[in-house]
Amino acid sequence: MLFNFSMSNKTKRRTTILNDWHKNKHPHIVSASCENESLVKCKICNVQFSIANKGNASIEQHNVSNAHKKNLEVLATSDKVTNFFRKNVFIETEKNLALAELVFSYHTVLHNHSFRSMDCTSKLMKLIHNAKFSCARTKTMAIVKNILYPYALAELKNELDGTEHLCFLSDASNHKAFKLYPTLVQYFNIEKGIQCKILDLSEIPGETSDIIANHLKEILIKNNLTKKVIGMSADNSNTNFGGLKRRGLNNIYTKMKSHLNSNIFGIGCNAHIISNAISTATEELSVSPEIIIPQIYLYFRNYTVRTETLKEFCDMNETEFRNLLGYSKTRWLALTPSIERILYLLEPLRSYFLSQEKIPKILQQFFERVEKSKIYFTFIHNQASIFSDYILKIEKTNISVMEVYKIILEFKQIMKRRLDTSYIPLILRSLISDLEESSPGFRVNFMKEINAFYNCCNKYLEEWTTPLEEFKIFGWTLLENSIINWEDVVATVDFLTAKGIEINDGKLLHEVDCANKYCNDTKISKWREEGLSSDMKWVEIFKHFNNNLIPHNNLLSVIQFAFALPGTNAAVERVFSIITDIWSSEKTQISIQCLTAQVYLKINLKEKCADFYNCMKNNNEILKRVHGVEKYIDV
């Protein structure tokens, strides 16, 4: 019997639903009220309706409605919500999912993608690979800040625990309304060689020596590094070192020596010194590129009409147009390409400016005597090229002060030789000869100027690179010869002893003898062919010592001291470049904390994404944190 009809003298007959019927006929229809048995509910549509009057016809009417049919279609194409829930049990499936989210977060930072891009990436991963993959911007940022950043910090601290000596590098830079101050450390790792990694990135309220010195002191104390610091590296400003003679008490270097109660080394940036040398020397010339190049660049910058007219002059001179390049003293390597571009466009530029009614007077003079101007610019370009070559050598990553000293010594010898011979490039000789008929006294005056250029350059280099002389006793650590001379090692031991560093010279002698046995002529030749850096040579030697149970504590201490000292502050400049790339105009909402985390990962974790995947796939501790909710709690 399908329906139950109840009659009453006071109530109208109504239809109710019976359990044994609806379970078989309409399983999606259930009773909606205990008090009103005629009120039913559709589980698919989540709507209630009464069957009191029409009974089964009301249900059939609902089943053929458009709303019910649409909900049936949606149900057929949708997974259950529970399929998307994370399981509390950390099984292999959950582990692989956490690994994928971790690596994609690392990939986002390493390749400088925006966190916003992970909203799209997460949806694509759901469609293509795993419906449970969920790593949009919020989760990605949480993983970067609260999992990857602490991991990188812990890795750095573990490495610093294994070294006796280190040097800190620092500098300040303005970014928008923030004064950012990164602090890096350089040290020698027995397995990886020279390492230069970021220790801290903070916003500071000012740039006085007191503020910076106190900030550095707090960082070193916080990381328990005060006893390991042997040097400070920074640019050569008065705030950092007190000028050329390093006098006075109101500079960071002097205050850090007082804070640390140690006579630490002060190492200026030698790449900056070379750049300043040519900048100072060009002041001896009648034509200064540091005045001319910015004037030309600014004349065309943001002026479309002027640029289009210049293009027409390029066509008339059969020269392909190329954009002009700017130059400033703080951009060490920008001078050479800037001069190259001016020389390339010299004829079109001359034609353009001399055709104008009104131009800056200095440019008018420059192009009216363009033959002479070309000679000066060609000379400066020739000099700037060799300066740039040596700056690039010094600026390479993970370089020691001894390597920098050797490069500087070689560069000074070249410049001294040019002074002694009054060297001018071959191309200039022909240009000067062509000009002699119209300007008979030009050669004499020009030779006086280039000699003054060389003399000024050599004097500047000699004055500013004097502090490097005390490090030449570490020359043997470069392993350029097959035999380590014990007398050279003794000089180093005496130097370190005077610094308060204890070395057992008896044991050191045995360790040096073992190193000499390993570093035979064949090994040295092999290293030279491979272009192996000095620090990696020592990594190979210490690996041999470990494999053969050869003691090497004293020799390791000496090498850690020698390779902890950098000869340039270029590593800090690279941090500023990374910050500029990360904190672009499209990423203005990034906080200082998030910026610090990203910079930390890009500098301290250098593995490629695939290598990082292999490194992390068995790290259950990290993967469990990715899987859990702890990542959303700021550390």
Image: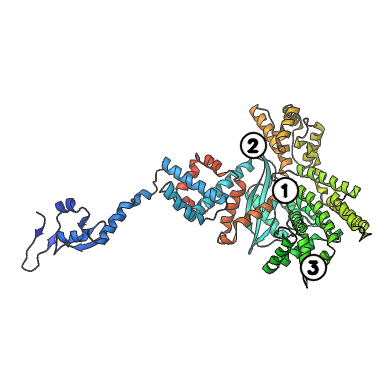
The residue that disc 1 covers is 395
What kind of element bears circle 3?
A: helix
* C-alpha separation, residue under disc 2 versus residue under disc 1: 23 Å
Residue labelled with disc 3: 354
**Spatial CA span between label 3 and label 2:** 63 Å
Q: In which quadrant of the rendered view does residue 539 lie?
A: top right
| Residue 93 picture location, percent across and down | 42, 42
In the orientation shown, which residue stands out farthest toward the left? 9
Regarding residue 377, the answer to whether it shows in the image is: yes
Query: Is residue 92 or residue 610 the one in the foreground?
Result: 610
Which of these two is toward me, 273 or 113?
113
Q: How many marks?
A: 3
Tag 1: amino acid: Glu
Which mark is nearer the camera, 2 or 1? 1
Q: Could you say where residue 511 lies in the image, as x and y percent from the top left?
A: 73, 30
Q: Position of residue 344 (x, y in %)?
A: 76, 57
- Residue 388 image position (x, y, % from top left): 76, 50
Q: Mark 2 — residue? A: 191
Residue 47's label in the rendered image is none
Give neighbour class at mark 1: few <14, some 14-19, many 20+ (Cα, 10 Å): many
Pointers 2 and 1 in contact (CB under 8 A)? no
How many angstroms separate mark 1 from mark 3 (CA)?
A: 41 Å
Q: Earlier in the sequence, mark 3 or mark 2?
A: 2
Image vertical order of residue 515 relative to residue 339, above or below: above
Quadrant placement of the N terminus = bottom left
At 65% from the left and 32% from the top, the residue drawn is 543
